[in-house]
Image: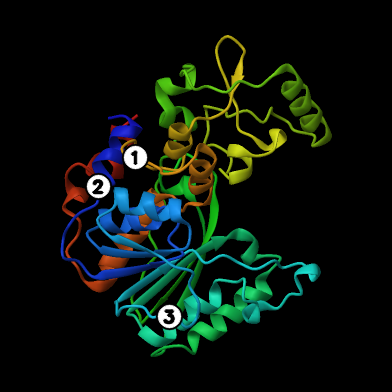
Amino acid sequence: MSYAEVLTSLLVPRSDDGPLVLDLFAGSGGLALGFEAQGFQTWGFEQDADCCMTYSHNLHGQCSQVTLTPQTDLPAASIIIAGPPCQPFSVGGLQLGLSDTRDGFPSFIAAVEHLKPQLWLFENVRGLFYRNRWYLDAILDQLRKSGPGYIVDVKLFRSADYGVPQNRERIIVVGHLGGFRFPLPQKHRVTAGDALGLLAVDAPPNSKFLTPSMDAYVARYEKASACVRPRDLHLDKPARTLTTRNLAGATGAMLPIRLPDGRRRRLTVREAARLQSFPDWYEFSGTENSQFNQIGNAAPPLLAYHLARSVRNYLGLAPDERDSSAGAAYLQPSLLF
């Protein structure tokens, strides 16, 4: 079974009448896809029109296009998940923390305080765990006071440990009432080559190749950065973290594929989506640049699938039947590759 087939088998939205999950700052639905594949209902809230269209087109849940504030009226739900945007942490950003109106966390905290769900979860950048730990501590202190005695667990996840072909590190924070357990890492690492398969040696009609001047720029960038290996996409290991910058931005940060004939081309939308663990049937709305932004900003659906299974266990729900059927091969990766 190929990696693409694994994603198609596991990441299928289900119309079960499972608990409702509010998905705040929902983006293009990466978290929601993992939760719907585990039988939860989702309702996304997102301000970007293209993201909302992508969400509604691919998922069972609806997406409300709205700019969330602490005053936003939200429906009752037993689970809240989110990927809140952070305000700038520099002195120039004034370091206003929870009082900064550009920050998504006040809206998330207000939702938890008002709805008091059985469990809440958010994901964010690893920098919040280190150089901005002061801010994370302030957020967690506020959340601990927001409900009926939440236990708060924090963990830095490397997506590659959960079947995602990418060294993407994200902080996952969960508030619960006791008994939640984070998913255990998988033993098998999926490489970029495993994920892309024949796509990695092909040049589709919409390919965008690096020009000689771009190649020269990348060479200078690599020399200045003392890169041990070229910054190409290496098929023998998981990819570097996909970001909006290396998918559609500056030349020096991109993840080009080096073809057998020596040419280097940029990743396509479909290749980027697969490296982020979106199944091939998942379609993104908007311009190519918008689609790259949606993918680069997304939470990997496969990581979300594992987290959602832990939430199922926490709620005492029956296991996903595919964990013992189509998903069994995935849970024993040696049967796959």
Q: Element type at marker 2? A: loop
User: Looking at numbered disc 1 in the image, what kind of residue is underneath it?
Assistant: Pro
Residue drawn at 32 percent across, 79 percent down: 118
Locate residue 208 relative to residue 193 in the image: left or right: right
At x 54%, y 62%, the residue is: 124
* Above or below, 237 relative to 128: above
Q: Nearer the viewer, residue 231 or 152?
A: 231
Name which residue type carries label 2: Val
Q: Is residue 77 above or below residue 310?
A: below
Q: Are marks 2 and 1 in contact (CB under 8 Å)?
A: yes
Disc 3: which residue: 111
Which comes before the other along the chain, label 2 or label 1?
A: 2
Disc nearest the viewer among 2 and 3: 3
The answer to whether marks 2 and 3 mark residues whose Cβ atoms lie closer than 8 Å is no
Q: What label does residue 279 carry, if any?
A: 1
Residue 128: name its quadrant: bottom right
Residue 232 spot, x, y in % from top left: 63, 28
Q: What crowding class fits label 1: few (fewer than 14 Cα within 10 Å), some (14-19), or many (20 or more)? A: many
Which mark is drawn over residue 152?
Answer: none
